[in-house]
Amino acid sequence: CYDKELISEAAKNSGFCEEMIENHDERPTSSFLYNLVMDSYSFGYNGTAYVDMPISQKIFIAQFNAIKQVAEEGPCVIVGRCADYALADRSDTLNIFIFGDEEQKIKTIMNRFPELNEGKARDMMIKKDKQRQSYYNYYSSKKWGRADTYDLCINSSTLGIDGTVNLICQYVNDYEQLYNKNS
């Protein structure tokens, strides 16, 4: 399962430090000034499109390549980061979107971060969802959260975490049987 671990993979393979990738993780930055200041690699160079590319896009490409690499190594679960977009050329993938009711998401955040009150947890949820949506919509040709973008969408508030895990496992097992039968 790869979530934050993709930051380490992308750093290892790209030459960027983990902190830089983490600071850009699932955050599109279209600010020309910010990209210019952060992109020390572009100073004094000209020529290739990669050199002229903003740092945020270079980091996206590093994560994109890390996603492709870990998928090539074998079965894996990749959380977010436009993985469905990175793996669009593969026929052996399932794209699953897990969402939840607002109140349940706030409770989950408060359980994970006991120092947060309900208002702060709500603000965190709204900010993170907007950030993920913005990142996904910026870098992919699809729309974040739209059912037609995924193979399966699940409201985890309905079955809870364990029930959602069981449903996904059953779906994956059924898919693998069908995929292997048709291969």
Image: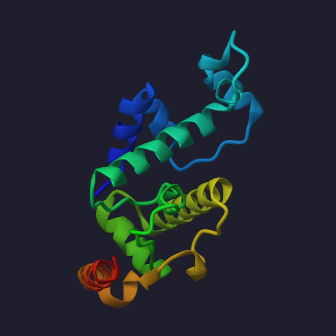
Above or below — where is 50 with respect to 178?
above
Question: Where is residue 180 shown, x and y percent of the image?
Answer: 28, 78
Which colour assignment does the render follow?
rainbow
Q: Residue at x 34, y 52 (%)?
A: 72
Q: Residue at x 32, y 62 (%)?
A: 77
Can you name the residue that lies furthest to the front here? Answer: 183
Can you name the residue that lies furthest to the bottom here? Answer: 158
Question: Where is residue 87 shown, x and y percent of the image?
Answer: 48, 59
Question: Where is residue 38 shown, x and y percent of the image?
Answer: 62, 25
Asked whether 51 or 80 is in front, the reply is: 51
**Left or right for 153, reference 31:** left
The quarter of the picture where residue 112 lies is bottom left
Question: Where is residue 90 shown, x and y percent of the image?
Answer: 45, 63
Can you name the residue that lies furthest to the top here? Answer: 44
**Left or right for 140, reference 64:** right
Q: Quadrant of the C terminus?
A: bottom left
Above or below — where is 92 with respect to 32?
below
Q: Residue at x 70, y 25 (%)?
A: 36
Q: Residue at x 63, y 47 (%)?
A: 28
Q: How many marks?
A: 0
Q: Quadrant of the N terminus?
A: bottom left
The quarter of the picture where residue 129 lies is bottom right
Above or below — where is 5 with respect to 117?
above
The quarter of the picture where residue 51 lies is top right
